[in-house]
Amino acid sequence: MSRWADQRRNPSAGRSAQSIRRRANHRRGRRGIPDGDEPSRAHLRVIDLRLVAPALVAWATAWIVLADSAMATTIMAVGVVVAFGVLLAMRRWRVAACGLVALSALACTTAHLQAASQGPLAQAGRDRSVVAIQGQVRSDPRELPSRFGSASHVVRIDVSRVDIAGVGWNVGCRVELSGHGDPGDAIAGLQVGQAVRLGGRADQPRQASQGLCARVALSASPQVIAPPGPMDSTINRMRSGLRDAMGWNSREQAGLVPSLVVGDTAGLPADLVDDFKASSLTHLTAVSGTNLTLMLVFFMAVARTAGVRGWWLRGLGVVVVAFFVVICRAEASVVRAAAMGLVALAATGRRGTGVAGLRQLSVAVWLVVLVDPWLARSWGFALSATATAGILWWAGLWQARMRRWAPGWLAESLCVPAAAQLATQPLITILSGEISVVGLGANMAAAPFVGPVTVLGLVAALISPVLGPLAQVMGWLAGCCVQPIILIAHLAASAPMATMTWPVSPGSITLLIIFCLMIALILGRLVGRRLGCLALAGVMVIACLWRPPLPGWPRDWQVVSCDVGQGDATLIRTGPRAAIVVDTGPEPDAMAACLTTAGVDTVPLLVLTHFHADHIDGTAGVLGSARVGQALVSPLASPASGAARVRSQLERAGVEIATASPGQEWAIGEGHWRTLQAGSGDVPGQPTSPGAGSESAENDASILGLAGNGDLNVLVTGDLEPDGQRNALREVPPQLLRADIVKVPHHGSARQSEDFLAATGARVALVSVGKKNGYGHPAAATLELLMRQQMTIMRTDEQGALAVARHSDRSLQVVSQR
């Protein structure tokens, strides 16, 4: 009462005291220091997990409904309704709220699923009918490389009318349009917002959880019947203007800036994408919630420096996010990123970024699931939500401690990506089967540059339609800011211990989660000490540069079948750190990891049996990890795109290229190579044989070779099919087909000649194949055939990389990686 009386007598006294407290709190918040003496206590006081459970319930409900199982959906719906009624009767209001949220997710997801799976166009997809549709382009065209021929292009169309067998319907759904050859080239030229009319054959979507009612393969080029509207035209000009604004920059800078800023990945060089993947920086090659958060951190720091405060600051942040969503097309990944970015923005109130933001995150997850339930089955959404949760849980406390000795901008730039990386690493490992050892350091090093690049890129896009020269200046500056990120990716990807294989099982993933939590605990203790951070940085550098020997891996191996997924890669030892490499698999980082594990840094001979992607796309991993002397390639340059890509890579690296022909021999150190069969005598580099360009012709053009180390021989077969195998039986002397080991043709497909495999007399059959591949490899019939020949079957999908060596008693030792 006395205090109230004092304020009545002197109103300014209360206001002055309040102003003093507000100014003190403002200064404390500006320095990033939470209320109280101990940051962790203030951090713990704002923990509120009440909304986390309803958000997870909504997510799980949508995930189950999207499985499209009527029985599972019915059982769940009945269970939720009964539980909701019982909880209401028991007055368990908070738990009943979870039931209410589940009902909302159930209703919205069911409605979306019914809209996508019902109707004439969805039925046409199930019947694979020919359709004529009219609609509007709603996504940028994407190129999908093909293993066997020319690339195809895909684009998404919002359909307004469909005609099937002469009957027309007005509809409202989305389809995926694809095309090869001339129709594919026409798709590549489409612009978002154009109204088109087209015809093709409908089919069911590849995945039921994509929100598409069908996919349509074009039968002819689409007809543009109306240009984009004013909004779409403006956005198209901005995105095109950003690409044009990068004209003064290098190829890598010009490709990465539009990708990072607006999600335009068309200009990204393939080798840069590979290095970003190896260094766990892939999220920087597309729109992501972490990128938007880092951009907002930088933007709001600049705004604070300019004097913007309070709700004006947060309102300006909302405007930036809205512009970001519009210019990035408001696709599912963009909506997801914007939701996560707004959560981070909402959490930058007076308490600072912290676990209080988990309430906003929970609401955002629930609303996103209601609006676009297809995201419930999206790994991208899971990664975004998990990364944001990690930022909210750890980054605020880490920043407060680090600001004791470091500037605020540096603390934010380092702590935010570190928290996101640790939170998402278990999910990344589930997807890839690997741990990026360099990922944490690479993300922390690259983070300070993400905000400036994004802001400069958005400014360049915004002004490009009216101020082209100034946009080029902004684009050049964005390119300069992105160059350190490019250098970090290249350096991290070239580290000896860039990645390590990690088994994907419940037990191993649980162990990884515990390991990440331990690192987070240690990091939280060290960030407040300058010397602790320096020591941690030193440990990270040592971990990246030193690769421990693989336990049990024989030092005297003679042949290695690499674990490169669904593809082929074989090493034949020629010296202590040298090997002949036959094929390079589909992934450069997997190929590089195999060379590193085997201790190979010199490749005197690189043999590429044929030009399918699963045999050549890892070539960049060999060129980046070892010195290559000479390359031997198939005489059939088909598919032309693959042949041209490989030749370009080899020529840029200064590697001499030879075309294979029967009878060629190399003796290299301890190793040797002999070409037994190559194509069918076509002119080198010209696909002139009958059927050239078809998958079977390309497979049968595979180089058949006998390679070995000392007296241990391996027959490498590429993707030879029965015709090519029978041709070898006719043309190759029988004694040259004899080998200790046979690399089973075509990943163990069912298309095998038993006579050919019997003629090898091999004791060990190596099957290079990817786990759970979609081709059914290796076929059961082939495995039975190999067992009839009394061969020991070794598979990379089950056992990982395989090393073979001969003992002094001439017995063979096969060591598996797993």
Image: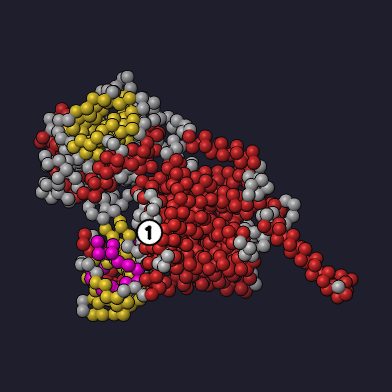
Q: Residue at x 14, y 43 (%)?
A: 723
Q: Residue at x 45, y 68 (%)?
A: 326
700 w.r.t. 287: above or below: above
Depth order, front residue of 482/193 = 482
Q: What kind of element bears circle 1? A: helix
The quarter of the picture where residue 780 lies is: top left
Residue 711 showing in the rendered view: yes
Image position, residue 611 (x, y; %): 23, 45
Image position, residue 49 (x, y; %): 62, 61
Bounds of the magenta span? 185-206
Q: Quadrant of the N terminus?
A: bottom right
Q: Which residue is mark 1?
A: 243
Q: On the picture, is 436 further left or further right than 667?
A: right
Depth order, front residue of 213/161 = 161
Q: Residues within 10 Å of mark 1 (few under 14, many from 20)?
A: many
127 w.r.t. 414: above or below: below
Q: Residue at x 10, y 35 (%)?
A: 731
Q: Amino acid at mark 1?
A: Arg
